[in-house]
Amino acid sequence: MNTRSDFSMKLKAILHDPIDKPFDIQGHKRRAREYAQALGVEWEDIKGPDWISSCMERSLISEGIIQEFDEIRHPFAESLIKDNFPRFKNEVFEVIKDITDDMGNVLPKEDDKKFLYIWRNYQEKLIKGSNGCEWKKYISLFPADTRVPDHSIWEHAKVTSAINALWDDENKNLLQNNSLFLFFYWSGSNIYKSGT
């Protein structure tokens, strides 16, 4: 396995799920493929990095549980946003497709620059491009999983793109080369820590 950053794989990983996934989970792979193609990326059903990031972010869920997109939760609070989000579905799909198509026309050709542009600008472009849409205020909160709506699709995509893993389908083996670091830094009389 290549331990260096492979930006073509990072692009496939960050675009493996569409940002509008919670609005129609059954059709999400088709839309992910369409959006990736509009951005000049060959879509792939990324398994290893997706599985690892999902395990990092979600509770264990029994197979077959389906949950409508009707709430967003904060992971560290009891706060809850309840709404009938599916009523925005068609408008969300149309706006995201249009903005993604436009963005595909201005992206750099090199995989590393393209990845960094998408990583840094995609959410901002969608927020600016959805002016006048009632759902605009929720873009940064769209959940990655409606059954555990406490982490955003944005965070899931970024974590997935940071994971260096490969699912070997022939041998049914997950190969990975990841490290977890814990950083401490000093600020006056306080010690802060953060993990990456």
Image (cartoon, helix red, strand yellow):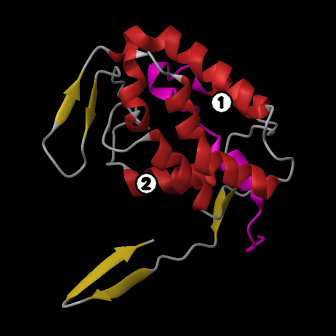
- Residue under the image location 32 percent in, 36 percent down: 149
- Residue under the image location 42 percent in, 38 percent down: 140
Based on the picture, tell me whether residue 18 belongs to the magenta stretch: yes
**SS at badge 1:** helix
Rendered location of residue 137, percent (x, y): 36, 28
Residue 186's quadrant in the figure?
bottom left
Looking at the rendering, the stretch of residues picked out in magenta corresponds to: 1-28
Tell me if 50 is positioned left or right of 132 in this view: right
Marking on residue 55: 2
Q: Which residue is mark 1?
A: 32
In the image, residue 130 sits, relative to residue 158, either above or below, namely above
Q: Nearer the viewer, residue 189 or 84?
A: 189
Rendered location of residue 165, percent (x, y): 65, 62
In the image, residue 163 sits, relative to residue 57, either above or below, namely below
| Residue ranking furthest to the right | 109
Based on the picture, tell me whether residue 60 belongs to the magenta stretch: no
